[in-house]
Amino acid sequence: MAQTEEFGEELADFVRRVAELKAARSVPHDDLPTVLDTAIFELDHVADQLWPWYERLTATGTAGTSSADRQEQQLLKGIFQRLPLPVALTDRETVVRRLNFAATNFTGVRAGYATGRPLSGFLAHPDRAAFRSQTAAVARGDGDRSLTVHLQQRPAVPVRATLTALRPSGEPRTAVLVVLQSAGARAPSAEGGPGPVPDLGETTRHAALMDLLDAMTTALLSGPATTRAAVLERAARVLHGRFADWVVADEGAARLCRTTVLGPADQRDVRAGDLEAQDPAACPLVVEAARGGSTALQVRPEDPDAFGRDASGAPVLVRANVTSLLCVPLTLDGAVQGVLTLFRTGPRLAFSMAEAQAMDMMSRHIALALGNLGRP
């Protein structure tokens, strides 16, 4: 330990001397050779003294790790995973390092998916900034904190998050241990959530997508549509409800025109009229799809302004509590005919890759129907 402290002091002195050399760059041209000689001397000091010293300290630390220490670390990891309380280990940026079994059930997020992603991303938008700020304060050493947050999948259930600093052995940075507990009458869980969690297997999910494809084809072929807006409305009504909570259709590419908005009947925070009044050109997701012609699938969207703002200035994704979205260009022979944007909100399961692939197929059928009515 004494050697480590001595090395740290020597390194700090070296850093100060380097700062002085940087300041000396402004000396007269005739004095620069002296400064250069000093810089070379400092580099030699690092190569000949500091680096071998660092290697000796590293080798000593590795050799000092006994089998008993390793066994104790394994035991602590096992205890962490089997704690009955939902617990997450994050860094100062709320990025998840570990998530125990109880936390996966509590949040409905798999540990493998959560690791490496910000824990704040699984919270409702209004709570994210406060959670990040409190986590950073704990990591700085400002003391333990506790705050009430809401999971994005279950925004009606308050969750108490308790944060405490933790220094894992052998690591230079402070981690933050986050304990999650229900602050309401009932604890949310992946099994008990209000959202539909089908357990009928991959065959049933595939059959549901095939039914949706059949319904879309039937709607597009059932009688002539006289306008492009009518085609988009037919397609939107097939998708609304059974596939997405919100369906927004925009016609065109260079000049986008919003033609159809269908949303939940019981939505109090956002009305269909709010989205109808939007300028599609103010929705970055729509503009990007119209320009690039590529589908966007987002789960727990990070950018609250990705679909623009409503007339009050509030982000649409936040007000509608959007938990996943699909933004699909309607492309025919490389030309974009329009854009469909689908939202799922609240506890509903997020869009899957299989559903995005099925939507991509339906988008080609819709684009063909639009093409039969002429170019935009």
Image: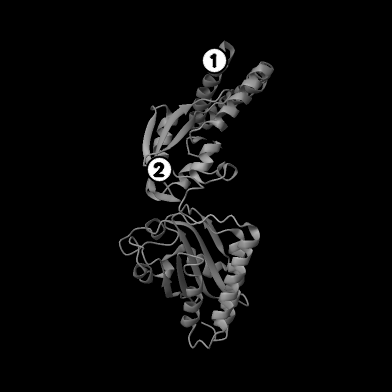
- Which residue is at 53% across, 32% downward? 29
**Relative vertical location of residue 305 with respect to residue 55 in this rendering, above or below:** below
Give the labeled residue for mark 1: 5
According to the image, label 2 marks what residue? 186
Classed neighbour count for the residue bearing mark 2: other residues with Cα under 10 Å, few (<14), some (14–19), many (≥20): few
Q: Amino acid at mark 1?
A: Glu
State the image coordinates of residue 276 (x, y, percent, origin top left): 38, 71
Percent of width and height locating residue 51: 65, 22
Out of 345 and 373, give the one closest to the viewer.
345
Residue 70 appears at what percent x and percent y? 65, 22
Q: Which residue is outermost to the front? A: 200
Say which of 22 and 61 sits in front: 61
| Residue 27 seen by the camera | no
* Residue type (three-letter) at the residue carrying disc 2: Arg
Which quadrant would residue 8 be assigned to in this image?
A: top right
N-term-proximal mark, 1 vs 2: 1
Q: Position of residue 225 (x, y in %)?
A: 50, 86
In the image, is 22 to the left or to the right of 147? right
Label 1 sits on a secondary structure element that is helix
Task: Give residue 204's quadrant in the image.
Answer: bottom right
Looking at the rendered image, the disc whose residue lies closer to the viewer, 1 or 2, is 2
Q: Is residue 175 visible?
A: yes
Q: Residue at x 46, y 81 (%)?
A: 229
Image-based side of 61 in relation to 180, left or right: right
> Looking at the figure, which quarter contains the N terminus?
top right
Q: Is residue 59 left or right of residue 152?
A: right
The image quarter in which residue 142 lies: top left
